[in-house]
Image: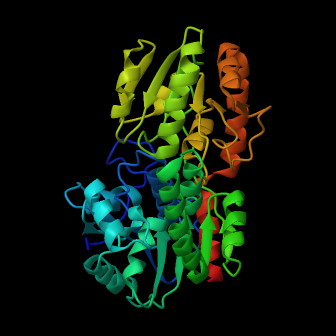
Amino acid sequence: MTPAGRAPDRLGSGTSAPGEPIARVARGAVPAPAKRLLWITPKWPLPANDGARQATTQLVAGLCSRGAIIDLLAIVPEGEPASEREAIEVLGVARASLIRRPKSGRARHLRNLGRHPLRAVTLAQYSNKALSQRLNEVVCEPETVAVFDGLHAAAWLYEMDTWPDVPFIYRAHNVESDLWVRAAARKRGPAAWLLNWQGHVVRKFETRLCQSAQRVLTVSDEDAARFRSLAETAHVDTLRIGMDPKPQREHPADGTQILFIGRLDWPPNRDGLKWFLDRVWPKVKGPFTLNIVGSGDGSWLTPHLRDSRIKFHGMVDSVTPYYHAAIVNIVPIFYGSGTRVKAIESSLFATACVGTEQGLEGLGFDPKRHYFRAESEAEWVEALNALDPEAARERGRNALELAAEGYDRDRIADQFLQTMGEL
């Protein structure tokens, strides 16, 4: 592991350029837990260019700014760049290290499916024997409380006949098994059967993990209720996603820029945006430009980019100018669980969302005050063609007021530390 270090006392945000610190000075620090927190993530958390990474970096940095001592351990694909020193400087963790895993791909997924049909294909890549043995050694160090940041961070337990007898917390970003089942409902034939089967094997592992954890910390009340129904003996609490305040707008948006922001190869994002581009966008008549910002494989967008009204920006150093220019941010999400980090972020920029109920799930937003709700193709077309810039600004301001109160990073970090004290 890399030698210990601390973050500079500077204010930043989850969408800062790589290397810019996001940890900040504590406002009345809460006493840190005495035990070592080993924070295990299934990918390198920097740069924080997608929702999962933002959720991780914001919570870890918030905890470190409140005095928690965290050792970060990331499971990173072979060949992917990662800087332990950057994690120490940016997040404020005491130590940072990584363990390499084989790269994923279709061939490896098929091989894992043949060898381990009772394991989910996306989890199996984290569960080979060598990787599991190394992780087990680190987790079993004295005075350790492990935090599995997402289901994939715990998938190496598949290889363990007996799970480590150490206290651990499962930080659940969503109900993974439901993602598979809801995706299956949108398919037919063998594809639907395969997705349903994957949902079944994920649920079996997910349930056991919840039952074994000292705490399951979900990002929304809806997910908490779902986990309680899956694992009745689990200790489940809601710990919302904490975010830094965002820079205030200097000038109002001009009313012509629409934004989509999100990881482009995450299935709910990809399927929702593709539906929007195929079914809704051709019928939008206003003088709008659609800016698409996001990391991940966006090659599937190529046919749509012949439309001069669509601008694809890929991964950017800072999302701030795009939120400030946008009159609304679209969230065409039709399945999934958890909380949409980009919807929280959009609200903190006072940029109103046009989205489905699923896309704004877990935020506690009122579609008459905080966002514009649209479900069907006709509702989406009407919402955008009848969009009033002043009404959008008002809903953006309302969303900011609610999000700033409910998703404050320091408050969320304090809640986590309180949970640690209860352990």
> Where, quadrant-wise, is the N terminus in this rendering?
bottom left
Residue extending farthest left: 79
Corner quadrant of residue 390: top right
Camera-side residue: 358 or 36? 358
Name the image colouring: rainbow
Whole-percent x and y of residue 121?
39, 63
Corner quadrant of residue 412: bottom right
Q: Is residue 132 left or right of residue 244?
A: left
**Residue 120 against residue 211 in the figure, above or below:** above
Residue plotted at (54% across, 41% down): 342
Q: Is residue 369 left or right of residue 255?
A: right
* Residue 110 visible in rendering: yes
**Residue 227 against residue 188 in the figure, above or below:** below
Whole-percent x and y of residue 46?
35, 52
Camera-side residue: 238 or 126? 126
Camera-side residue: 62 or 121? 121
